[in-house]
Amino acid sequence: MATAAQSVPGRARTFLKNVRAGDEIAYLITFVFAASVVLITAILVFELWVKSGASIHKFGFNFLHTSTWDPVNDEFGALPFVYGTIITSILGLLLSVPLGVGAAIFLSELAPPKLSNALTFLVELLAAVPSVIFGLLAIFALVPLMRSFVQPWLISAFGWSPFFKGPPYGFGVLTASMVLAIMMFPYIISISREALIQVPREQREAALALGATRWEATWDAVVPFARLGIVGSVFLSLARALGETMAVTMVIGNDPKINASILAPGYTIASVIANEFTEATGDMHLSALIELGLVLFLITIILNGLGQLLLMLTTRQGTAR
Amino acid sequence: MIMSATPKPGITGTRSEETVESPAPPAPAAATGPKLRASNVNFFYGKFQALHSISIDFPENQITALIGPSGCGKSTFLRTLNRINDTIRGARFTGEVVMDGSSITQVDVTELRRRVGMVFQRPNPFPKSIFDNIAYGVRINGLARRSEIADVVEKSLRRAALWEEVKDKLNKSAYALSGGQQQRLCIARALAVNPEVLLLDEPCSALDPIATSKIEELLLSIRDQCTLIIVTHNMQQAARVADLTGFFLMGKLVEFNKTDVIFKNPAKKETEDYITGRFG
Amino acid sequence: MLILWRKTVNGVMLTLTGICAFVTASALFLILGYLVWNGGKSLDWNFFTKLPLSPGELGGGMANAIIGSAKIVALAALIGVPVGFLSGVYIAEFSGKAMANVIRYTADLLNGVPSIVIGIFAWTLLVVPMHHFSAWAGGFALSLMVIPVTLRATEQFLGQVPLALREGALALGASKWRSVATVVIPAARTGIMTGIILGVARVSGETAPLLFTALNNQYWSKGFGEPTASLPVMIYTHAISPYEDWHRQAWAAGLVLLGLVLVANIAARMVLAKGAASQRG
């Protein structure tokens, strides 16, 4: 601190030094914390890589396309889980995208602003519902419904095809997909709605001015213009669905087999990790499970990256070229 | 009230002394009446009144320009004619707009908009190919068989003076064209559905002088097939292109007459002030 | 005729989209309704005060899970909020563009890591060296999910503070850090707070990261170094069990958990909306 005996420039210099020192310290502290975020993420990737080393070393790429999952004999092939993860997510998308985009269209184009905001608020709250609660409802509300009504009907109508064979368990790939679909709604709806709202009015008016009906103008002019944003929302939702653990684990049936029928039980990467991790019989088993985690991690990174990229393209260019 | 007599049959010009009170005079027999007649149109955005008692007769196959400073309501009035303002919440108008004897609020709005086309201030092609942009209106209105669509597209592009420039890249995205070309594309797109009236809302304001003059040439060339109403900021453009001109000020129609008269011998002081640039 | 067909299609499709919107919006009500109906019946004073009993024995509760969740979530917030917040301050106020992009990208990456993989990581980092499951590991795992949310909220709302406000402080002679700490951050505090609340509410419902970090516990856990019960994990284990009794407990716990999460979310969003409205004036 400057004392009264110091000259004016001296006092000023000290003052500046303190000020700058304060700034330096603040910069340093915040930098350290920010760097720690990068550090911890790097360690995460590193640990995943290292701990799956044993499994990667033993199985190589065969890991991804063999189907034997035998903890007793230390033989691990991940294909059933990869299949289960992908099929439930894709099926979930098929169910949720039409509903979600339809809802987004209504909320952005047709609903009066107050109604649109209220409904969007409700839909976005759905994203806050914990996964385990979806699972709870799925087990006790959805599964009985599937077992008693939906699946028997599907079997009677489509049982001739390989996709709908088997007894109506209630549990299974289809049920898990339906739960995923519900969990994906908020993401598809809110992101697509944003993309649709950003479409310039002149696009819709151009179509209307040619004599289009309201639906034609929306479907032919507005939606295509927002397609990058809508596809982006699909990618992001897909990434979420792939990593979804609890709700899926509770209804998928936990059977590591690949089955053409969507009424059959299955298994996803996240589910097998959740179920077997604490009971893992040995280091190779653990390593295989961790390698599964690594695979899941990589897939979700890629999808998330693509999704973010698409969204960035829409906001930056503002058009759907 | 004085009606200006012209050699062309069926042309009526309306001059209002007091813009609030005087309705348009009764038109002669319907067959030679105006293509589009607005009577006492008041327009409201919610509580705000944007247009006050506008009455204009738009003669067939003529170009009418609507001029006036920013915010005077000329665009609002134009957009009333094809009811595109219907899409704006809280927008409504009173009074009557009649085309060929039928009020525009009584006819089906999609049919109205096919017959009354619109070109917007900024080019707004769809994110489709050039071909699909033009074909869009034709397809949804069912105006041509599959096999004929290509011909319709070519004809429209020729009318818009764009065919030579794009005939080899019809499948390319419309966004690959320059601004002036895109606007001509939008005109071609509007012409493809054979409108009887074409509304143009400051179509050249986003374009350079060369593109502008190309479009003005285009408008003059299609006049005999179409009734054109153009809103413009650019008085020289109105003078070059329009047969009739209406001057709007603060939501009122101050003066409406042959373009020559408006620019060389305006009856109202406000018109004269605007034309001589005393205010923007 | 064509026009009739087009008008019919128009009406049908527009109605369908409306149905889509109402169906998806009502999903929330359905879920809530189910939980209230099934969980309300089982919710009693015992639930909040007693430990879980063996299936068949009535009068048990999930008091340990409630406390356990509180401990774990508090730990997650204690670790995650400062890290996320200060990192956000760094990006928004102090760093250069390149560094900011790196950190932002990393945070987005961390945000996208599936929660089960977060659990794996916390397991390798804490459970293995410590040789047992603990609330430390659970809290750490959840903190990794709190960090990106807090970071983004901080950066976003600090960025929205108008330049005029910042320059005003600097013009009065305040140093950079002073102006940030006393003017900029308070100006953004509503948004940042709500972001934090939303993030913490989200992790309080997470189950997967706790499965092999905090594990579970039928009894009280002392301190933070033991396996700790939590509401989400309890719901999970009870729901998949074969006991009617435990199912009822799961419903009750589900109602409590969802109630807490929704209240936090609604409150945070309303505060945010009010803050935004008052800024717009």
Image (cartoon, rainbow, N blue to C red):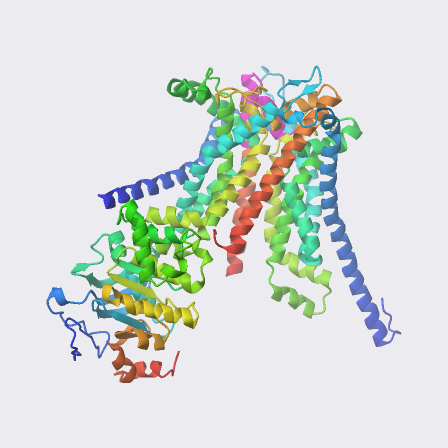
Quadrant of res C116: top right
Return the residue nearer the eye: C129 or C238.
C129
Return the residue nearer the eye: A93 or B136.
B136
Answer yes or no: is residue A246 visible: yes
Horizontal and vertical percent for residue C217? 68, 24
Horizontal and vertical percent for residue A22? 78, 60
Position of the N terminus of chain C by quadrant: top left
Quadrant of res B74: bottom left
| C18 to the left or right of C208 | left
Image point (79%, 57%), residue name = A25
Image point (50%, 56%), residue name = C277
Image point (80%, 30%), residue name = C129
Residue with the most extreme left position: B29
**Residue B98, relative to residue C91: is it above or below?**
below
Horizontal and vertical percent for residue A170? 48, 20
Residue C242 covered by magenta stretch: yes
Answer yes or no: is residue A134 visible: no
Per the rendered image, the range of residues in magenta is C229-256
Residue A3 covered by magenta stretch: no
